[in-house]
Image (cartoon, coloured by chain):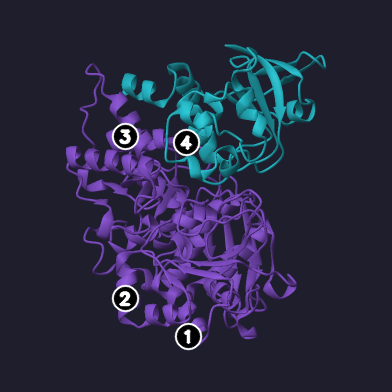
Chain colours: A cyan, B purple
Amino acid sequence: MTIEGRVWTCGDHVDTDAIIPARYLNVSTAEALAVHCFEDVDAAFAREAGATEEPRIIVAGHNFGCGSSREHAPLAIKGAGVACVIAKSFARIFYRNAINIGLPILTCTEAVEGSEAGDRLRIDLRAGTITNLTQGETYETSPFPSFIMDIIDAGGLVAYTSQHG
Amino acid sequence: MGYTLAEKIIAAHRVDGAPGGDVSAGDHVQARVDVVLANDITAPIAIREFEKLDDGNGPLSGRVFDPERVVLVADHFTPNKDIKSAEQCRFVRQFAEEQGLPHHYDGGRAGIEHVLLPEQGLVAPGDLVVGADSHTCTYGALGAFATGMGSTDIGVAMATGQVWLRVPETMRIVYRGELRPWVGGKDLILETIGRIGVSGALYQAIEFAGPAVKGLSMAARFTMANMAIEAGGKAGLFDVDDKTREYVGGRVERAYTAYRADEDADYARVLEMDVSQLEPVVAEPHLPENVRPVGAIGEVEIDQAVIGSCTNGRLEDLRTAAQVLRGQQVAPGVRCIVIPGTQKVYLDALREGLVEALIEAGAVVSTPTCGPCLGGHMGVLAAGERAVSTTNRNFRGRMGDPASEVYLSGPAVAAASAVAGRIIHPDGI
């Protein structure tokens, strides 16, 4: 599976209140949440969701998605047209949630440090490679454990469980 | 090489591999769960995912794995703060009725989930608990392995009674020294997060140990375990001792096993902390790791003080608040909001005269809710406003407008600050 998109950057410890403020948790669909994604951080983020055909790729620092367990956070990101999140590290509940709902995520410090806002990236999830087309660099990530790859291949945890019980 | 508390509990719950076989940090295992939890915010997504599981062709029946072990608590935006919240709560209530779940709590039976479940005896030592709420780690105070997950994980666990887990490494923190006056569990955990950082225990379990925590009440232990997630932790566990047994006695009706870490367990890190000189601390905006002694933060005026939450909404916390506020007056222009964690805490506080003392001091006493902690309702901040709060997160915008600020503290500092109108040491009033 290959993903291409344009980089949107953020720093360390981006918390789930920043991704989707709690005042919007009275709804729970990706579409309804996406319009408020990163609203308090960058008001343009959600507005630009449908503005270009090119998907966005979030490039973040350490501990992305820390804080609450709200699955609304990866749902909002996915709903806002983000094709992948690359970070130096992820908070563990966010990491599980993203895999479970089928939002591609990768851990790769070198790619984060080598990318700037607006760069175009091409990601090969199966091969675990990230190519920065703007800078002309390619980075390798460590592969997912096989059973996590099985969940990803199935299309998320619900599809996987339906098949395997 | 021996095993940590987390490894032992997970090994006992493993359903794949050799039964009763050992597990070690880094292993991925399939485990059965004792309790599955969700709230009014996270349950709607969990239920929708649960309902997708049964397509009529698969092995699942469309029923929860065990109605006694699925717990649903309406606590975040309740009593329903708006129409959409009311719809979410109704959806959860209908599911509970359809599935015949005896442990669905709302209205006058409700409370803040992580105060309520231990109080009702729903979690036992040695349990493996998963909840669609990050502060599910609170039950580690009972010697249970309890961890927060998202709604899809919980929806699947409601159906199968199982989850996949990566067995975490463990950090053991040994606390030594006698605590000074006004220093409690909240100060210990904030000081710890200040020391190791908000990702200092990322993916790890924390074992809280040492003579200083053995002396702590169960309430203080719940406070500490509750904030393991604020250091990135997957769980925060205490050994079971006489205080634990006394607490669960008369509450937990099923048999349980008290596991204990081996002396030669393999720890990722062992941290020794001498807390004998520790003063009450606060965490400044906008991360729980920005911890300083209350005496070192200078002149910080406040608009609001919140005393409550799954971190500090227990009877002991209200006693501390009332001890400080009794005979005093909340400063003009300050809203002091006190929220008992459950209806039982509320009633006990009422019978002890705590509620009277708090109201006479000018505090607002609310029905149990998570409300203000996450900027939901019952104490939302305007732009430029500042609160001192006994809750667990001070992220930007957490309690309201993105231009508001939250300082985290224990109940003594929060109550004293409400009287002074600025953040101060309780000795200062």
Q: Are marks 4 and 3 in contact (CB under 8 Å)?
A: no
How many numbered dots are placed on residues in this image? 4
Instruction: State which quarter of the image contains the C terminus of chain B.
Output: bottom right
Judging by the rendered image, the residue that carries numbered circle 2 is B348
Q: Position of residue B142 (x, y in %)?
A: 39, 62
Please, which chain is the residue tagged with disc 2 on? B
Reading the image, the residue beneath label 3 is B47
Q: CA distance from mark 4 to mark 3?
A: 13 Å
The percent position of residue B109, horizontal first and vertical second, equals: 25, 59
Near mark 4 (Cα within 10 A), the count class, few <14, some 14-19 or many ≥20, is many
Q: Earlier along the polypeptide chain: callout 2 or callout 1?
A: 1
Mark 1 in CB contact with mark 4 (< 8 angstroms):
no
Disc 1 packing (10 Å; few <14; some 14–19; many ≥20): some
Amino acid of disc 3? Ile
Q: Chain letter for mark 3, please.
A: B
Amino acid at pointer 2: Asp
Q: Is residue B108 above or below residue A98?
A: below
Nearer to us of marks 1 and 4 is 1
Q: Chain of mark 4?
A: A
Given residues A31 and A99, the one toward you in this image is A31
Label 2's element? helix
User: Which residue in the protein does label 4 denote?
Assistant: A71
Which residue bears the numbered disc 1?
B326
Residue B26 visible (yes or no) = no
Amino acid at dot 1: Arg
Q: Which subunit holds the residue at mark 1?
A: B
